[in-house]
């Protein structure tokens, strides 16, 4: 994997901690909206981790297989990924 391991692992660890917290919230029968907000925050962390991995893949693995003209297409794809990941 070409992505920044430290950053990806940080986000995944935070998401794991949030999931553990969400489980405790469900077990404690906490307010549904509070649980939902925590789920959304976790989903955001996971999307950001995925975005980093996909960007690194496009910038390294995929770019290596393309000519210089293909680099513009990679940048276009990265912009689309950023938009759909938000």
Image (cartoon, rainbow, N blue to C red):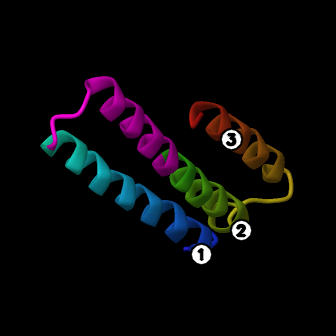
Q: Please tell me in which quadrant of the rendered image residue 15 appears.
A: bottom left
Q: Residue beneath label 1, please?
A: 6
Task: State whether residue 23 is above or below residue 8.
Answer: above
Who comes first in sequence, dot 1 or dot 3? 1
- The one nearer the camera, 35 or 64, is 35
Residue 78: assigned label: none
Task: State whether residue 67 is above or below residue 74.
Answer: below
- The one nearer the camera, 25 or 3, is 25
Residue shown at 75% from the left, 39% from the top = 76
Chief SS of the magenta region: helix
Does residue 5 appear left or right of residue 30 in this picture? Answer: right
Q: Residue beneath label 3, please?
A: 77
Furthest residue in direction top, as rendered? 33
- The percent position of residue 29, horizontal first and vertical second, equals 15, 35
Q: CA distance from mark 1 to mark 3?
A: 24 Å
Who comes first in sequence, dot 2 or dot 1? 1
Residue shown at 51% from the left, 53% from the top = 50
Residue 15 appears in the figure: yes
| In this rendering, the label closer to the viewer, 1 or 3 | 1
Q: Which residues are magenta?
A: 28-46
- The percent position of residue 34, horizontal first and vertical second, equals 35, 31
- The percent position of residue 18, horizontal first and vertical second, equals 38, 53
């Amino acid at each position: 994997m070409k992505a920044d391991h430290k950053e990806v692992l940080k986000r995944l660890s935070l998401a794991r901690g949030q999931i553990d917290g969400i489980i405790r919230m469900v077990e404690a029968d906490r307010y549904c909206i509070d649980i939902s907000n925590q789920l959304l925050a976790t989903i955001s962390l996971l999307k950001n981790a995925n975005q980093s991995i996909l960007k690194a893949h496009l910038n390294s693995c995929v770019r290596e297989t393309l000519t210089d003209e293909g680099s513009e297409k990679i940048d276009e794809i990265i912009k689309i990924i950023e938009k759909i990941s938000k």
